[in-house]
Image (cartoon, rainbow, N blue to C red):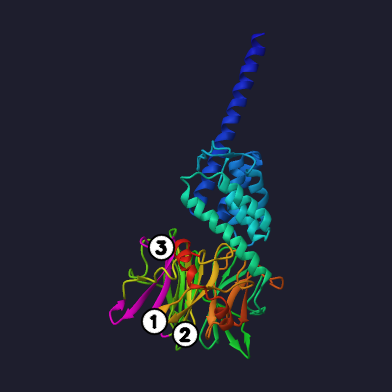
Amino acid sequence: MRKILHLTIFSLLLTMSVQAQRASYFRRLFVDAEYYFLYEDYRDALPFYLELHNAYPDNANISYRIGLCYLNIPNEKHKSIPFFEKATKSITQTYNEGYFTETQAPREVYLHYGRALRILNEFQKSNNAFAKYSSLLTDADSIAKTIVGKELMSLALAQDYIENPIAVKFTSAGRNVNTRFSEINPVVSADTSRMVYTSVQQFYSAIMVANKRAKVWSFPLNINSQILADGIISTVGMSADGFTVLFSRNDNDVFNLYTSKYDPVKDQWGSISRLPKEINSRNWENYASFSPTGDTIYFSSNRPGGSGGFDLYQSIRTPTGWSVAVNLGGVLNSPFDEIAPTVSSDGKRLFFSSKGHGSMGGYDIFVSEMVNGRWGRPVNLRYPINTTDDDVFYFPISNGSSGYVSRVLPQSFGENDIYLLEFDLDSLIKANRRPEFLSPLIDATGY
């Protein structure tokens, strides 16, 4: 009898030890996943969350985090839907973010679920998700109410733009440039003879240079070894002569702006050089562009003192260096994010991406014209240049009626391919000028 009792106690202790070890292992997985998630490394966080999901399939918090990861990974956003749907089965108003013991999802799951549905053009389902999220808000949730109100307005705008598309011609940059990888952020010289772009390859970002011969882009050259670029880096701008390229690089989870200059005598690019403190701050500077003459740099930053998260700024080259950056003001900068400024070759049109100003959802590309020395009200480039997903980077050619984008289209060779697009920008601007009576609404909400 005593022997049986000892065996029972031993078996119980062994089971408890195994369970404790198992819990400890998954707790460590959760901490690792949350670490990557905190720094927006969604691809790295995802495998940890998926392993946790296999162990705890009914944990709404894990499903919610997986949904958020997929929603922030280009070309995989549709995969978020089933995880958000599972997370909505268990909602709490007292969500404890970052805790392994939290097994429910926050009410914000409906906001992100609605965004995912919008990207898939499931407008009615998206509207229902936003409405559900709105119903869970209280009078104290004024910021959240503004956000969901913007989402509902974006849905209506998206349906209108998709039902009334503008005429756009997309021409692939060709098989030499476009590969099975994602090719993004193409920047081109004013004479369109040189293109520098980023190829997001398996283990690093490759900076590629292609030259145009007989209207065909040549096989590109990888210049990472020349510019001494490592880590997460991407092209963001180019001088009109094609001899200076602007880059954005992740320096310990803070993005800074760099340049590299081409030496035509040596036929070689110089190592990247960080722009000075007048431009780079302790916060993020993630996109930049030169004016046609090169004496002004436009860039986006989330430094304190702006209208929203990211705002547009400018700095002017002086005999002693770059001037202190100046915010471009409330006509261009909304309470939401504005990034990726680029300027037409004549300097009269500024293109940028915004989550405000009446977007179709997420980032849309807008254009502003210089009138009497001031940038005018932004105009949405509409569908199909803009979509219900994030549309971030447009590099204009000449007056901006043509330009280069990175896009996933049915004819793409891999993921994102580079395309030249052509459209009637002058007519679009005239047709989309906003009535003056809308100005207070624009100023208040970014619309």
Q: Amino acid at mark 2?
A: Ala
Tell me the residue at 40%/76% (across/down). Answer: 297
Cα distance between the residues tagged 1 and 3: 21 Å
The residue most toward the left is 320
Q: For mark 1, does the 10 Å Cα neighbourhood hold few (<14), some (14 to 19), or many (20 or more) residues?
A: few
Q: What is the x, y in percent for residue 163?
A: 68, 69
Residue 299 lies in the magenta-colored region: yes
What secondary structure is marked by label 1?
loop
In depth, the one of 249 and 127 nearer the eye is 127
Q: Pick out the residue farthest to the bottom.
A: 214
Query: In this orientation, which residue lies closer to the viewer: 266 or 34?
Result: 34
For residue 140, side relative to residue 323 (left or right): right
Residue 373 is marked as 1
Verify whether residue 217 appears in magenta: no
Q: Which residue is mark 3?
A: 307
The numbered mark, 2 or 3, whose residue comes first in the sequence reads 2
SS type, badge 2: loop
Which residue is disc 2 drawn over?
240
Nearest to N terminus: mark 1 or mark 2: 2
- Where residue 282 sits, quadrant-wise, is bottom left
Q: Quadrant of residue 154?
A: bottom right
How packed mark 2 is, by other alpha carbons closer than 10 Å (few <14, some 14-19, many 20 or more), is: many
Distance from disc 1 to disc 2, alpha carbons, whole Å, reads 21 Å
Seen at 38% across and 74% down, the residue is 314
Q: Magenta stretch: give its range.
A: 293-322
Amino acid beneath label 1: Gly
Taking depth in this image into account, of 17 and 295 the one nearest to the observer is 295
Q: Nearer the viewer, mark 2 or mark 3?
A: 3
Work out which residue is located at the far top of the displayed protein and give it. Answer: 1
